DNA sequence: TTTCTTCCATACGGTTCAGTATTGAAAATT
DNA sequence: AATTTTCAATACTGAACCGTATGGAAGAAA
């Protein structure tokens, strides 16, 4: 409603990034099935005419969305793991916390949608592989600085990310007697390198 | 092709379970988007006429699929965790192994599709919650028999399942220098209760 | 002002799918 | 054998969607 008036007041029209941003929001709320041209147009208060001006076709949009997601994830992990010497453990625990708290209201659904989608789309598979490799590189580096062997650092990184993604897939709110305690125990298990 | 002749030779026609079985296969291969009436009909070499005889509508099928999936998962976990005294650790390690090996070619994609789907469907959410609760009950029992406190048993169970589901979401084949070693390290981390 | 470029609206055709109605054929029952 | 019940094929409506073609409005350039 407000969007509409703003647009009619000649906002310098939409560009590719606006469509991608809307697509990511749709991906978060409706999953991969939400990446529809006409549906996105409604979300942005325009028509398909705009879409086919900025994009070749739906395939083009999907590729752009994946690329934008990849860049965002890699930028995030670099920020999270850029720890000064001595703060490596805090950085790891912070990384672990970012995903398991309710902060990532938007991020985690996108993450899951992309990964589930990667089971049937080779482009998504490649993007996920790139993101995973970069993330594990970054966390493994921190674990090694804490004294872990390369093998252990890799294993801990794998466990860390598998846990956070897997946890977000579970619905155990009704079962966990003390969710906070369980999370603390797990965090200690993953991110406590015995020096 | 063979299916076709068999059917024409008057196999006692399809029943609900055949449709559900086909739906689970479609769910595994194409995700939630594969649960289409006409698509399933093609897969079973019949037409929609048959579907609407056995089911009220698509909503009906989806509910039946979720229910069938739930029962299957609960039956599986009961079988996996029915360990004789002294074999608890082996049962836990076996449970851990079942999901992380390539055996579950069909099961894991369904698991992920249902769980991703549960982000937007209340029925799927409820089903997943039931399955999670039962699984964690079963594994926590084993951990407690191994000497873990109730809190630790719960935490370990949560970590176990979050890990196996999260791992199946990751694409780190190109990065892991020694996948087997990492898996062993993680298994030891999750399922080695210090007595 | 006129022309051109940019950006979007509208209208259209084609596809896929959910759901309904009707018909038909084999099986079971009488 | 006649009839009823069970199950599936066919044909249809309507909606959602992709992609194209065309026209139009606003701003920039001439």
Image (cartoon, coloured by chain):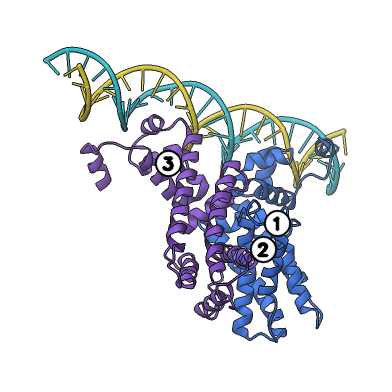
Chain colours: A blue, B purple, C yellow, D cyan
Depth check, front residue: B17 or B152: B152
Task: Tell me the chain of label 3.
Answer: B
Q: Tell me the distance, in whole angstroms, between the alpha carbons under discs 2 and 3.
A: 33 Å
x and y percent of residue B48 in the render?
A: 39, 33
Q: Tell me the distance, in whole angstroms, between the alpha carbons under discs 1 and 2.
A: 12 Å
x and y percent of residue A22 in the render?
A: 71, 48
For the residues labelled 1 and 2, say whether their Cβ atoms are less than 8 Å apart: no
Is label 3 in a helix, a strand or a loop? helix
For the residues labelled 2 and 3, say whether their Cβ atoms are less than 8 Å apart: no
Which marked residue is nearer to the observer: mark 1 or mark 2? 1
Depth check, front residue: A15 or A122: A122
x and y percent of residue B54 in the render?
A: 39, 32
Q: Which residue is mark 1?
A: A107
Q: Crowdedness of circle 3 by 10 Å Cα count: few (<14), some, many (20+)?
A: some
Q: Quadrant of the image for the C terminus of chain B?
A: bottom right
Rendered position, B64 above or below A78: above
Depth check, front residue: A40 or B139: B139
Rendered position, C10 above or below A3: above
Q: Crowdedness of circle 2 by 10 Å Cα count: few (<14), some, many (20+)?
A: some
Q: Residue at x 70, y 59 (%)?
A: A178
The first of marks 1 and 2 along the sequence is: 2
Q: Residue at x 54, y 74 (%)?
A: B187
Q: Residue at x 53, y 50 (%)?
A: B114
Q: Tell me the distance, in whole angstroms, between the alpha carbons under discs 3 and 1.
A: 32 Å
Rendered position, A168 above or below A158: above
> Which labelled disc corresponds to residue A70?
2
Depth check, front residue: B160 or C14: B160
Task: Tell me the chain of label 2.
Answer: A
Is label 1 in a helix, a strand or a loop? helix
Task: Tell me the chain of label 1.
Answer: A
x and y percent of residue A189 in the render?
A: 66, 74
Q: Which residue is mark 3?
A: B39
């Amino acid at each position: 409603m407000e969007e509409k008036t703003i647009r009619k007041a000649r906002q310098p029209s939409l560009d590719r990034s606006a469509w991608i941003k809307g697509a990511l929001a749709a991906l978060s709320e409706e999953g991969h099935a939400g990446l529809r041209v006409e549906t996105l147009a409604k979300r942005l208060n325009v028509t398909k005419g705009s879409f086919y001006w900025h994009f070749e076709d739906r395939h083009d949009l999907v590729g752009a969305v994946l690329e934008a997601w990849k860049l965002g994830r890699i930028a995030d992990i670099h920020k999270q793991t850029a720890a000064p010497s001595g703060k490596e453990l805090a950085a790891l625990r912070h990384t672990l916390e970012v995903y398991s708290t309710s902060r990532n209201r938007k991020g985690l659904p996108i993450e899951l949608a992309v990964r589930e989608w990667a089971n049937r789309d080779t482009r998504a598979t490649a993007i996920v592989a790139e993101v995973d490799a970069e993330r594990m590189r970054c966390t493994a580096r921190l674990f090694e600085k804490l004294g872990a062997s390369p093998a252990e650092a890799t294993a801990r990184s794998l466990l860390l990310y598998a846990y956070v993604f897997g946890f977000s897939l579970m619905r155990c709110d009704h079962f966990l007697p003390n969710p906070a305690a369980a999370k603390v125990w797990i965090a200690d298990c993953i991110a406590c390198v015995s020096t």
